[in-house]
Image (cartoon, rainbow, N blue to C red):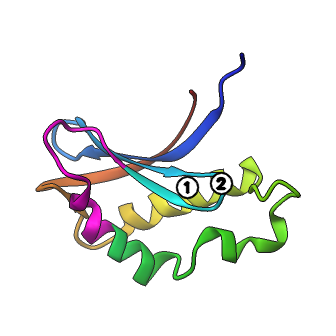
Amino acid sequence: MAGELEIGVLLVDRTNEAQIGFIKFEPSGLLVYQIIEQGMHVFAFKPIDHLLNEQWIKEPLYEKHAASMDENKKLPIEILEQEARSCADFLNSLDHPPTLGGHAVKAMMVKSMQ
């Protein structure tokens, strides 16, 4: 069975490049936060979630791109890639790097087969 393409923003520690967290851009238009560093709780994403909702997107992707959703209520891969790239650019452009569980992080758009 073929894998599914996963698109998102990988958050890595600015000093040692350790993978800390991942923001998955779901075809349904939702963002799913995942912790990679062991022992950290998903609530560590709260400050980043606040930044994204208040300063970056201001509305869910499924509302922003409602006209682009197909008959299965899924967003095209191209839109997910565009939005993930925009999210990473936004996070990296902040005057003060965002933190996740005490780690100053940088963001990069990634896609992989799962």
Q: For marks 1 and 2, give the CA distance.
A: 6 Å
Circle 1/circle 2 CB separation < 8 Å: yes
Q: Nearer the viewer, residue 108 or 23?
A: 23
Q: Which residues are magenta?
A: 34-48
For numbered disc 2, what is the local secondary structure? helix
Q: Is residue 40 above or below residue 60?
A: above
Q: Nearer the viewer, residue 103 or 53?
A: 53
Residue 41 rendering spot, x and y as whole percentages: 19, 51
**Mark 2 Cα within 10 Å, few/some/many (few <14, many 20+)?**
many
The type of residue carrying mark 2 is Leu
Residue 57 badge = none
Which residue sits at x=23%, y=61%? 43
Reading the image, the residue beneath label 1 is 84
Q: Nearer the viewer, residue 32 or 100?
A: 32
Reading the image, the residue beneath label 2 is 80
Residue 57 rendering spot, x and y as whole percentages: 53, 76
**Mark 1 Cα within 10 Å, few/some/many (few <14, many 20+)?**
many
Q: Is residue 40 within the magenta segment?
A: yes
